[in-house]
Each structure stands twice: as C-alpha cells, then as structure tokens.
Amino acid sequence: MSIEQTERRQGAALVAPALLWTVAFFVLPFAAMIWMSLSHLEGREVVSGPGIGNYLRIFTEPSLLRGIRVSLEITAIVTVLSVILAWPLAWIIATRVPPKWRRLALMLAVLPFWTSYVVRSYSWTLVLGENGIVMQGLIQLGLLEQPLQIMATRTATIIGFVHFFVMLLTLTIYSNLVQLSPNYARAAEDLGASRWQVIRLVILPLTLPGVMTGAFLTFVLCIGDYITPQILGGNSELTLPQLIMLQLGRRGDYPMASALAVVLMVLVTLAYAACARWLKMERV
Amino acid sequence: MRILSWAYLVLLFLFILLPVGALVVFSFQDGRLPVPPFKGFTLEWYAKVIADRDLMAALWNSFLVAFGSSALALVLGFLAASGLARVALPGSVLLRGLLIAPMTVSYLIIALGLLQVFNAVGVRPSLLSTGIGHVVINLPLCFSIIYAAMGEHQRNALRAARDLGAREWQVLALISAPMLAPALAAAFFLSVTFSWDEFIIAFLLTRFDVTLPVEIWSMLRSGLSPATNAIGSLVFLVSVAVVVTLEFTLFRKSRS
C-alpha cells in the first residue's frame, strides 16, 4: 500500500467519529423532522405520508400566518434598533475612551452576557413591571401618574432583545473598528473632510462587514428564540418559536410543529442569502 | 462632540447594566418582592437557594452536562480537524460543510429533530439525551476553531514526528494537542459556556433530572421572588469571577 493510501485511510478514520455523530444526531433527526412536517395528525395519532397540508394551513390560517408576521416584525425592529444603538457605543469605546480604559469599558459593555439567558429576561421583568424601578422612578419624579403597561407586550420583548443584541453587535463592530488603520481617517481629513464626513463616508462603510456579521447573528438568534418573547411578551402576540412550542405542548402536534420549524429555517436561509456578500463565514 | 460622546456612553451603560444591577441589589431584599422600595439587607434568600435541593441538583446536572458534552465535542472536533487538515480526502469541502452545518440551524430545530428520533426509538428524555444534543451544537464550534488553528507549521511538525517513527496516537497526543493547546482551551471554554446556558434543548430533552436554566425557568412560574434573584446573581458573580481570573492569568500571559 502506498504512503498516500495509508495517509488517506488514517485521515478518514480520524474524521469518521465526528461524521457518524453528525449524521446520527443531526442529519437523521433533521430528515425525520422534514418527513414529519409532511405528515399530519388524525385524532392524536400521527399519520405519515407526504402531503403539504401543514404548509397550506400555515399560509391560510390567520393565527399561524400572524406568528410569522409577528416574528419578522419583531426581528426586523430589533436588528435595526440594535445596530443603531451599538454602532456609536462601539465607536466611542474604540476612539474616545483612553486606551488603558478600553478593555474595561468593553468588559462592562458586555457584562450581562455572564448571567444566564433565562435570568437576563427575568431581570427585565423586575425593571419593567408596574412596581419595577423604571415605573416607580418615573412616578416619583412626577413624570407619570400611573404605571404604564409594558410587561406582556411587544415593547417588553423588543427591549429585552435589544439589550442582548446591543452587547453582541458592540463586540462585532468594535473588533471591526480596531482593525481599521487610522490612516484612512487621517487621509480623509487631509483631503478636507469634516469629522462628521469622515465618520459617515469613510469609517461607517468600512465597518459594514462587522455590522452585517452582527446583524445576521442578531436575525438568526432573535427569530429562533423562545425565552425572551415567552417571559417578556407573554401570550399577547405569539412568535414563531412560541407557536412551535404550543403545538408540541398542548396538542402534541408534531407534524405542525415540524412544518413551522421548516418555515423558520427557510427564513434564516433567506436572511443568509441576503447577507452572504458581507459575511466571511469561513473565518468563524 | 466630546460631551455628547460621554453622555451617550453613560446612557448606554445604564441601559446595559440596569437589569443586572436590579437583579443583584434586590437579591438582598428583606421582603417578599424583589421590587422597590428596598426594605433592608438580608442574606436569607441566598441561604434559601443554597439549601434548595432541586436547585443544587440542577446545578450539578448542568455541570455534568456542560463538562461531559464539551469534552466529547472537543475530542471529536480535534480528531476530525486532524484528519481533514492532514490529507485531501475526496469531498473534503463537503465534509467540512457537513460538520459545520449544525451551527447554522436554530437550537429549537435541533431539539425538535432529536426529540422525534428519540421518541421513535424509545429513548427517554434525560441528561444523556440533553448531553447528546449539546455535543451536536458544540462539535461544529470545536471543529472550526481547531481546524482554523492548524497551519503549515503544524503540518510540518507532525510529518517530522511521523518520519521519526512516532505512532499515530503519539503524534496526536504528544505533538499535535500540546501545539494546539490555546485553541483547544478556547474551544472547550466556549463549549462549556454555551452548554451551561443552553435552555431549549435541555427543556425539551430532559424530564426529571433537569439542568439549571430549566430549573430556573420553572421557578419563574411562581412569579417574582428574591430567591430567583439570588440564584441568578450567584451564577452571574461566579461567571464574572471565572472570567476575571482567566483574564488576569491565562490570557494576560499569552498576550505579553
């Protein structure tokens, strides 16, 4: 046997365990889920068989169609708001904070990452509730007569999400900003650009990769998340993941849950296709 | 411009740190509700949380799942990266894509698929099935971090070791692993973090032995309580302590 053949055989043997694992616990379940999405429920029994009944129902039943719309709206608002809030923060930390405080500032900006995700959503219920700090503070200051109802509305979900994703985007944009050579800004200034023009016309476009990577991550994680809308938004408006969990729990309707999951995946794939130009996934 | 910058910085920090601040402050609340007014300082809720058997069992379960699944993901990822970096196998690109694929899918979808397969073959929800799910989400991470760290320099050293008569396992354990130690540590640390905090897979794939996020989730059903604040603060403070320690020991050394 030639050396090359031996090398190949050994290489294949090394890859095999990971490959088997991925096939058994990812590819197979994934295929099972797609097959399930083409089945349907009769009584409490799953009747297998390829049919697109679930998908037809998703796009005709108002409650299900509404879930897709709500998810897309919330995700779009969250992504845009997070980018708008995070960019200046990352820029200020990267350029305005003195270098020796930079690491500390960045660590503070992402500090809440270190609580658990469930606890982070819970902690917003402390702040936003009728007896929470914000409402009570505003009443004390005389700015409000009665506490506003924010909990269990879309606003609460959005605040909770934006909080998390501002941290994430600050990281991706910051790491993009510090890689930029200061010569770009200097050259633009020499050529007579105002400080504002430098930011808008030079720095901002150069951070597009960082922004898009962060925005894509935001989209994917936000649209697939069950915890934040469930804890903060409650049942006022159901998002796609909430609908999926509802199918599983109350009715045991695995086929419908699977079909909704496939829709979720298609939405993520579309988002990827839209951002692919700016994403350098091979670097991840 | 300068004043505006600082004002913005302060405002955003307030927004970012407000909920965690409220969480920690009201974990010391001497009263039944973790909302203003602050009625006085007590450690009662911490004592209650530490004495809570279910919670401590969940903490231990999370520990087991996080370290167990991360160790397995690390080994599988390391072996696969070694294999793929070594020779150009037919369909290498496809294999790499397949190994990374789970990273592009929502955890909810991975959980749903596993749940169906486990149901079909009669595997009961347990810590083991949750661990399997966590290996699925962390394997792509470990693989890609380790694969990215393998350079030409690595490959030459491995070839030299083989030429000098080292056996395959010796090459992997004595040459490759030590050379990749920083990448291996990073991959393991990230995996533990993700597994530790993962909710939806653990929620769908455990029943009686649950992990910490699932146990906290069930605490939320009884409404606001300083006890929830206490366990949340505890997790937070321990993680921050770990990160700060790492920052001042491991990473400081590697940077200087």
Image (cartoon, coloured by chain):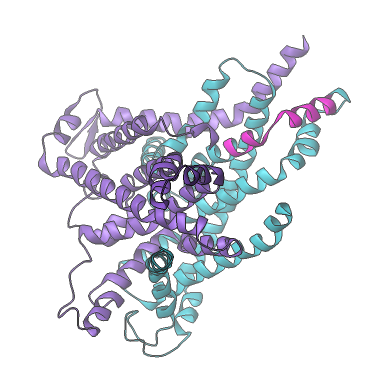
- Residue in the image at 34% along x and 48% along y: A222
- Residue in the image at 26% along x and 40% along y: A257
In front of the other: A163 or B39 = A163
Q: Is A112 displayed left or right of A253 in the figure?
A: right
The residue lying furthest to the bottom in this view is: B40
Q: Can residue B178 be seen at all in this image of the molecule?
A: yes
Display colour for chain A: purple
Q: Is residue B150 magenta?
A: yes
Q: Is residue A163 magenta?
A: no
- Residue in the image at 40% along x and 72% along y: B228
Q: Quadrant of residue A156?
A: bottom left
| Magenta span: chief secondary structure | helix
In the image, which residues are magenta?
B144-162
The N terminus of chain B is located in which quarter? bottom left
Q: Is A84 displayed left or right of B234 in the figure?
A: left
Display colour for chain B: cyan
Q: Is A260 displayed left or right of A84 in the figure?
A: left
In front of the other: B74 or A214 = A214
Q: Can you give x and y, in whole percent of width and height, for residue B149 in the image?
A: 66, 37
Q: Can you give x and y, in whole percent of width and height, for residue A283 in the image?
A: 54, 35
- Residue in the image at 24% along x and 22% along y: A50
